[in-house]
Image (cartoon, helix red, strand yellow):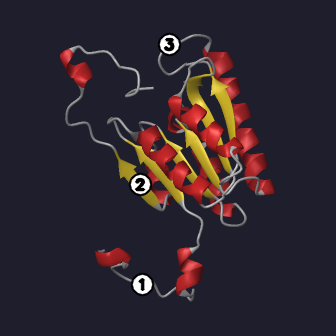
Amino acid sequence: MPQGQPSSVPDDGLTTRQRRNRPLTIVHTGIGKGKSTAAFGLALRAWNQGWPIGVFQFVKSAKWKVGEERALRVLGDSGEGGTVAWHKMGEGWSWVQRDIADSEEAAKEGWEQVKRDLAAETYQLYVLDEFAYPIHWGWVDIDEVIQVLNDRPGTQHVIITGRNAPEKLVEAADLVTDMTKVKHPMDAGQKGQRGIEW
């Protein structure tokens, strides 16, 4: 794809502008580091364009101090770019198994909120952080997710992160990146560190 040119142009009856401005479903999956980080990088670009952004964290605990949250909240409140709303649904249940029933219910409630916001066109960019987990675990129905995403109005972009993204989701998405781990400090016994992991 030299100089941003597509390798082929579909015969879909759309103009170049119509095709360029289609809403995208983006999936960041795989066992490597950087899925959420890449999604938040896209959120920075969206903020710069003045887009309203909705971040929905499905796994990370509401108690965790996530660096990207603070940065995006400050930017969202600055009046310079887009607004940023941050929704936390999890209690850290991907890493420390606690009350699974409560975690499942929180994930389902979070998905219901996303559906309401998509229907209302509340945001231009949605970051569904770690949403691949509740789909993979069967807490949220994959067929419903795909249907809702396919039927969403306007030009709302949706990014879903997390390991084990179901094949149906990968097939339905417009852009998929599989983060592959080649090497990580944890392999040598080093714990995560401030400024790198959070």
User: Mark 2 packing: few (<14 Cα in 10 Å), some, or many (20+)?
Assistant: some
Numbered disc 3: secondary structure: loop
| Residue 103 visible at all | yes
Residue visible at 25% across and 36% down in the picture: 181
Residue for point 45% across, 26% down? 198
Q: Quadrant of the N terminus?
A: bottom left
Look at the numbered discs 2 and 3 and tell me whether their residues touch, using CB distance below 8 Å: no
Q: Hey, what amino acid is under mark 3?
A: Val
Instruction: State which tag comes first along the sequence, 2 or 3.
Output: 3
Q: How far from the left and from the top, in percent, is residue 192?
A: 35, 19
- Look at 66% across and 59% down and name the residue there: 50
Q: Which residue is mark 2?
A: 176
Residue of label 1: 9
Find numbered disc 1 in the image and state the secondary structure of the residue it sits on: loop
Asked where in the image residue 163 lies, by quadrant, the reply is top left
193 above or below 176?
above
Cα distance in 3D space between marks 2 and 3: 28 Å
Using the image, tell me which numbered label, if any, was put on residue 162.
none
State the separation of the CA atoms marked 2 and 1.
19 Å
**Looking at the picture, how far across and down is residue 22, in whole percent?**
58, 71
Residue 135 figure quarter = top right
Structural crowding at the residue carrying mark 3, measured as other residues with C-alpha within 10 Å and reported as few (<14), some (14–19) or many (≥20): few
